[in-house]
Amino acid sequence: MVPETATTPAFDDLGLRPELLKALGDLGFHTPTPVQARAIPLLLTSEKDVVALAQTGTGKTAAFGLPILEFLDPADRTIQTLVLAPTRELCVQISKDIERFAAHMKGTRVVAVYGGASIRDQIRDIQRGAQIIVATPGRLLDLIGRDVLNLTTVDVVVLDEADEMLNMGFQEDLTEILQNTPKDKRTWLFSATMSGEVRRIAKRYMREFEEVSIGPANAAATMIQHQYCVVHSKDRYAALKRFVDADPELFGIVFCRTKHETQDLATALVKDGYNADAIHGDLSQAQRDQVMGRYRSRSLRLLIATDVAARGIDVKDVTHVIHFDLPGEVENYTHRSGRTGRAGRTGISLSIIGVRDVNKVRQLERGLKTHFIFVRVPGGAEIGQQQVKAYMKRLASVEVDREGLAELLSEARTELQSFEKDELIDRFMSLAFNRIIEQHRTSYDLNVDMSRKDHSARAERPTSLERFSTGRQMFINLGTADGFDKGKMLGYVCGITGLSGELIGKMLIKDVYSFIDIEPAHFEQVLTAFQNASYKGRSVRVDAAGGPGKSAPRGGGSYQGGGDRGGSSPHGGGGYKGGGDRGTGGYKSSYRGGGDRPDRPQSGGGNERPSRGGYPKKDFYEPKTKYPKKERK
């Protein structure tokens, strides 16, 4: 392994051609990063293959891109270098960076080939003459199969983000691609982590190699502060919004596990008024480019992404990486958090976790050899104060359009001239911010008290019934059989009603129905919003669920004392507990507290607890006797 040097040289000292030094000067690059300072001289002088390990965001593209251009012969129109990357975003990013470095090398052509774009255009670009091909494995194999590419002239092969290519299942593709390249080529492997798979691929596909490592393997970047908060699982969405509200300068990437969760979260945030959008594998290349264009221009404040889709995202000044779902592997966490704290800047990697995920944080600490800082979800008063301070900063820096507001300004001075300066400020602040401060003052504490053995945090956080005073409960005919869990149900209800997640309390998700606590002041709004609603072509029915003995305002039934369809209809009358779930005279006229057979609709005897509507030990009653088969006539 190459030892680290004590001093960092300038780019002028690395042996690069003048054209490259001029391009670096134009870009404002004068001092190489540690990985560049160590890798570039080695790649320029060593005849061996090279394995370089460094964290994401440390300048690895320039570390191999500049040596590639140093060896390049612009007069030779054959393919001289092949760069393989796992995703199209990273592929595009690498090709653009190399083009910038080669700005003063006339005749240099870089072609990026990846899925999701026109293969005809890519073939045309290659046939015009390309010395450097930057490709994803799948599209490259497609072009090889069409006899478009001749890789026998390749001098250097670069495997960038090799660990991720293996995680994505590209091992067989790599084998086939490398078999089409010369045996005497040089291979440079760059990775953020040195997993067992990466080491095996180095031994399998590379000759004798030297290893360059910046920092310990799999270690966290030193410019990133790793934080975590602990909330109840159903409060993660509310916690996310509070962190965003409390920091007006937050510009971040939020990670979810699946593309469906990514899209659901982005949709919920947009409905709640946040500038957010999702990027995942189901988007076309044009859609991905549009989303990334908006994010880079800061038209979006939050980019919701999956692990794979976020590879290659190199956006300046990302302040936060937020893990809405923790990744399963240390390597994935390393790649995620590497989206912030890039190029010497500081950043925050925040994990919003439930109680059950605390052990995962401890495992990440051991794997990354770093400490995670516990932080509390901001309270309402803190959020209100931060928003007021941010508004005052914008107010102090705003440019006044005196010409456009001439008449109004004159009238305002006349109307307000009787007030002293301090009194005028007091009145302005009261009028502008009373609503904001009052809105957040009553917000409940989302943090889980981890010092309590039961982790219930009742001393800090009221239950949904306490929080909503009367605890209005809603019945909905959707459940786990429809693919809903608590998170998806929360997003669905917020999407239909336009409510904030903080106004929705405890949920009971069963197989074909659910019960949801709603803040009383917004209860009628919810019922109205669900009128004529449908889900996957099926009508969605929403009713109010009352307490024991209370009847629902729609249909006469109740969760604990009436029916869920009510009245004297064929499916009405009884209640989920103590009544019937399909009513007097219906099948199972009293699920818990009535009869269980249609031929005994008014037996009055419950299956398990005849006179009381309590929860039995089992969720569902299975009768011991089976109905006799009907005889054929």
Image (cartoon, helix red, strand yellow):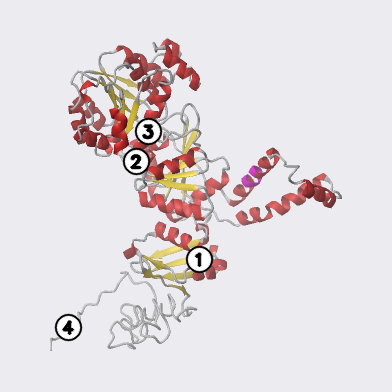
- Amino acid type at image mark 2: Val
Tell me if residue 625 comes above or below residue 248 in the rendering: below
- Amino acid type at image mark 1: Ile
- Which element carries disc 1, helix, strand or loop? strand
Alpha carbon distance from label 1 to label 2? 37 Å
**Mark 4 against mark 3, which lies toward the viewer?**
3
Q: Residue 518 carries which label?
A: 1
**Mark 2 against mark 3, which lies toward the viewer?**
3
Residue at numbered disc 4: 628
Q: Residues within 10 Å of mark 3 (few under 14, many from 20)?
A: many
Specify which label sits upstream in the sequence, 2 or 3.
Answer: 3
Residue at numbered disc 2: 308
Q: Which mark is residue 488?
A: none
- Amino acid type at image mark 3: Val
Q: Can residue 463 be seen in this view?
A: no
- Which element carries disc 4, helix, strand or loop? loop
Q: Residues within 10 Å of mark 4 (few under 14, many from 20)?
A: few
The foreground one among 488 and 382 is 488
Residue at numbered disc 3: 92
Q: Is residue 168 visible?
A: yes
- Classify residue 555 by image quadrant: bottom left
In magenta, the rendered stretch is 386-390
Q: Is residue 594 left or right of residue 173?
A: right
Tell me if residue 590 comes above or below residue 448 in the rendering: below
Q: Is the magenta stretch mostly helix, strand or loop?
A: helix
Q: Is residue 564 magenta?
A: no
